[in-house]
């Protein structure tokens, strides 16, 4: 596949001249922590856009739903809320991926620049995500196709980097991900699963901790015991009709604020895995030096 601009700008240079080596699992985990810590302000700046916009959208939606009684109007409000929330989530997710690629290459980047690039590549990124979702979700809901859904989820799971980094089209991004993952599926599966579990556990522990603190302060009264899935729904997707507006707002703000910590983990991990595969399969760094 022909290389694209790959974030190259006239004044951008890789400041680290040491040739990077293939990464094992512990190297990737350590790399996530290192990149996150050293570029904390950049990642938090991007995620702040997500938190502010999502919280604003939620508050407007609750305000309109509490004052509306017509089914058609409520349906429109819910639909607009879902659509706006999806746009914000996709845009910020793409911005985090773009930022992760830049910081890996030791290049300077601002929050605005990352989000602008995410917006410029928004539709190819959405299209590749739609293709990924149609196949993965379509197979998953058949139950018998769940193993195949997991297989394609990993095989095409790196589509975001080709779209944003190589400026590939939606379909070519899936092909590109397939090329990189081929022969390393089990390794990719293990690493992505571990990263997902780590991100989930950090978020869950923080959610539970804040829930306990809010209960002690009397801001959110303790609720009846729930099973695991009901607990997840109460923590991550509180429903305003099941509690007062103030309690809902506080819980929702806390839930979104935890994204400051957890959201960048997945994009950074996927970026490190992407470059690791390129180094192993294509001698990526050598290729860049020749190009220079």
Image: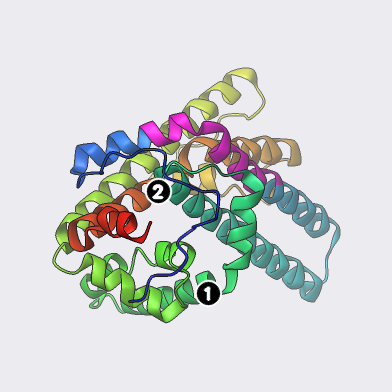
- Residue 265's quadrant in the figure? top left
Q: Relative to 45, does residue 74 appear above or below in the rendering?
A: below
Quick one: quadrant of the N terminus?
Answer: bottom left
| Residue named by callout 2 | 266
Disc 2 to disc 1, C-alpha distance: 20 Å
Name the one closer to the observer, 241 or 237: 237
Q: Is residue 109 visible to the viewer in this orientation of the structure?
A: yes
Q: Is residue 265 visible to the viewer in this orientation of the structure?
A: no
Residue stretch rendered in magenta on the structure: 34-52
Compared across the picture, whether 40 is left or right of 46 comes to left
Q: Residue 252: give x, y in percent of width and height.
A: 63, 41
257 in magenta: no
- Residue at position x 30%, y 59% from top? 290
Instruction: Classify mark 2: residues with Cα within 10 Å, few (<14), some (14-19) or many (20+).
Output: some
Instruction: Give the numbered dot on residue 6.
Output: none
Compared across the picture, whether 213 is left or right of 66 comes to left
Helix, strand or loop for disc 2: helix
Magenta region, main secondary structure: helix
Q: Relative to 248, does residue 214 appear above or below in the rendering?
A: above
Instruction: Please identify, in this view, whether the residue under mark 2 or under mark 1 is nearer the observer.
Output: 1
- Residue at position x 45%, y 43% from top? 103
Quick one: quadrant of the C terminus?
Answer: bottom left
Q: Residue 97: give x, y in percent of width and height.
A: 47, 53
Instruction: Classify mark 1: residues with Cα within 10 Å, few (<14), some (14-19) or many (20+).
Output: many
| Residue named by callout 1 | 124
Helix, strand or loop for disc 1: helix
- Residue at position x 81%, y 55% from top? 66
46 in magenta: yes
Compared across the picture, whether 119 is left or right of 38 comes to right
Q: Relative to 284, does residue 137 appear above or below in the rendering?
A: below
Q: Residue 111: give x, y in percent of width and height.
A: 62, 45
Between discs 2 and 1, the one toward the N terminus: 1
């Amino acid at each position: 596949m022909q290389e694209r601009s790959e974030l190259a700008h006239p004044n951008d240079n890789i400041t680290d001249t040491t040739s990077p080596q293939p990464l094992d699992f512990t190297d990737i985990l350590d790399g996530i922590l290192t990149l996150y810590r050293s570029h904390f302000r950049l990642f938090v700046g991007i995620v702040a856009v997500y938190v502010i916009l999502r919280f604003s959208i939620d508050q407007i939606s609750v305000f309109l739903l509490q004052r509306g009684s017509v089914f058609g109007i409520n349906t429109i409000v819910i639909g607009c809320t879902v659509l706006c929330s999806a746009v914000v989530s996709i845009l910020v997710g793409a911005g985090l991926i773009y930022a992760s690629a830049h910081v890996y290459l030791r290049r300077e980047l601002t929050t605005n620049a990352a989000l602008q690039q995410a917006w410029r590549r928004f539709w190819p990124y959405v299209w590749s995500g739609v293709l990924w979702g149609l196949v993965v979700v379509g197979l998953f809901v058949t139950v018998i196709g769940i193993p195949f859904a997991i297989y394609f989820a990993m095989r095409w799971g790196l589509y975001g980097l080709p779209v944003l980094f190589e400026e590939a089209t939606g379909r070519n991004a899936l092909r590109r991900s397939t090329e990189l993952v081929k022969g390393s599926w089990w390794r990719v599966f293990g690493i992505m699963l571990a990263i997902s579990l780590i991100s989930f556990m950090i978020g869950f522990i923080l959610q539970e901790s804040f829930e306990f603190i809010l209960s002690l302060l009397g801001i959110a009264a303790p609720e009846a015991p729930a099973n695991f899935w009901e607990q997840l729904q109460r923590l991550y997707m509180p429903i305003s009709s099941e509690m007062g507006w103030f309690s809902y707002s506080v819980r929702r703000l806390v839930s979104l604020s935890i994204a400051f910590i957890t959201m960048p983990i997945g994009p950074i991990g996927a970026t490190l895995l992407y470059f690791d595969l390129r180094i192993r399969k294509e001698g990526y760094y050598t290729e860049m030096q020749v190009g220079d």
